[in-house]
Amino acid sequence: MKRIWIVLICIMLFTAIPAAKADTDAEKLTDRCTFDFGTQKEAGNDLLRGRGAVVSLKADASFSLTWDEALADARLCLQWQDEPEEVRLLQYGADEALLSEETLPPYPETVLPLLPDARRAEIRNGTKNMRLLAAAVYGAGELPDPFHDWQEIPEHVDYLLISTHPDDDVLYLGSIVPTYGAERGYVGTILYVTNQNRTRKSEAENGAWAMGLRVRPVFFGMRDIFSGTTKARRTLFSYDELLQNTVRAYRRLKPLVVFAQDLNGEYGHWQHKRTAKAAREAFSLAADPEYDPESVGLYGTWQVQKLYLHLFRKNTILIDAHTPLAAFDGKDAYEVACDAFLKHQSQQRYHFRVRRDSGQYAFNRFGMAEGVVPVGEDVFDNIDETLFCGYVAPPTPEPTPSASPERTETPEPSAKPTPKPTPRPRPAKEPEPDPTPLYWVASITLLASTATGFAAYCWKKRQNEKHPPEDKES
């Protein structure tokens, strides 16, 4: 019987799986708060339970929530049918003293930090009727869809993806954000040209977040028209309007490198073609002070350094989609893009899927169509390092005191070549502590102890069989 137990212990030791990493999902704190939706109490309760209910807020109406004790790193998460206008968040302390008042940003999904000393929060609507789709309170950690704690757009970005439709950024440009954004630390965002559907906009944000994007994406809001007459295409999806919007986006976001779709529209989609054409034409127009003086006054001109087009056949580059990415626990860019495409639930019934390398629509095959610097081997090669986000100039060395103060002659300076700037190190993701080494040390120690005990047991049994003990007289 002892042998059986020893064998079972050994099997368990060698087949056990190391403990999973600590859960980083945000704790849901909604049940620790009391929501008051006024006369819409029933709809509010269903909304909090995720039953698809909607709370309608008329102009100047409000709702509130209270909690009895401090909630660490609490965030109030709200989802609206439309962008909120003049909606305010007021926070009060336990004595009902007003602690803060702020206007909500104009985004359908808003994440609002709750103050540590606050015990009540009130949402007051403005002059526009609003429809609330979801409300919840979460602590620190990863928020669930559709809530994302986006970073605001900085003064300029390292890269910009231009996607005609939500999901085009995954299907055709999906190797960029995981590889250069999440893994290598370049700062960028995604511009979606068409988004007239609230569901697809939310799917776009969920998919972009899954790819590792952290800077809030941009939406043009132009019409999505799969087909139509020439007149409809000219009026409902005007190329001139698209081109102007693209130039303004270049000037406002100031990207160093732009990635856009195939000039042939991948599978021939006419809106894809127009988007790619506008991205290429805007490359020079954004730097032209004569084009669109209004946006010149708002943002100034801007010269993009490189423009890469999907499947472009000159100056080609194949983004590595096979190397495991530390930012995604060893998944490669292809696996990350496939996971991100699943966030586009409304598109799963179609035949689209992410394709890499040799596929007809390989999501990692690009060519530099425009550039003011040499192409190089990497998409960011030959760009002045001081232009990148987060560039930190090397410290100026302290002057060395002269060891010979009596020196009077000054030698003429010799011509020295300007040293080549070293590439800017990319911020690396801090590796999480790996519990595996400690686990296996403990496992091996336990195994050695068990084996020693088993060997002692076998030796003693054999000795007893050779020299049975004599019965002692009572």
Image: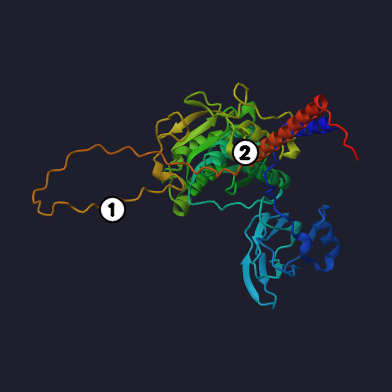
The answer to which image quadrant residue 425 occupies is top left
Q: Secondary structure at mark 1?
A: loop
**Identity of the residue furthest to the right in this view:** 474
Q: Secondary structure at mark 2?
A: helix
Q: Residue at x 56, y 53 (%)?
A: 152
Q: Is residue 177 above or below residue 103?
A: above
Residue 166 in view of the camera:
no
Residue 345, how many percent across, how many down? 75, 39
Evaluate whether residue 296 shows in this view: yes
Q: Quadrant of the C terminus?
A: top right
Q: Nearer the viewer, residue 369 or 33?
A: 33
Mark 2 sits on what residue?
A: 437
- For the residues carrying marks 1 and 2, which lies nearer the camera in this image? 2
Q: Residue 419 location in percent, x, y? A: 30, 38
Write down the residue under mark 1: 398
Which residue corresponds to the image point at 61% horizontal and 32% vertical from the top-left?
332
Left or right: residue 191 compared with residue 37: left
First in residue order: circle 1 vs circle 2: 1
**In the rendering, at what x and y percent does residue 91 appear?**
67, 70
**Disc 1 residue type?**
Glu
Indicate the quadrant containing the N terminus: top left, top right, bottom left or bottom right.
Answer: top right
For residue 248, side relative to residue 416 (left or right): right
Q: Residues within 10 Å of mark 1 (few under 14, many from 20)?
A: few
74, above or below 154, in the image? below
Q: How many marks?
A: 2
Mark 2 Cα within 10 Å, few/some/many (few <14, many 20+)? few
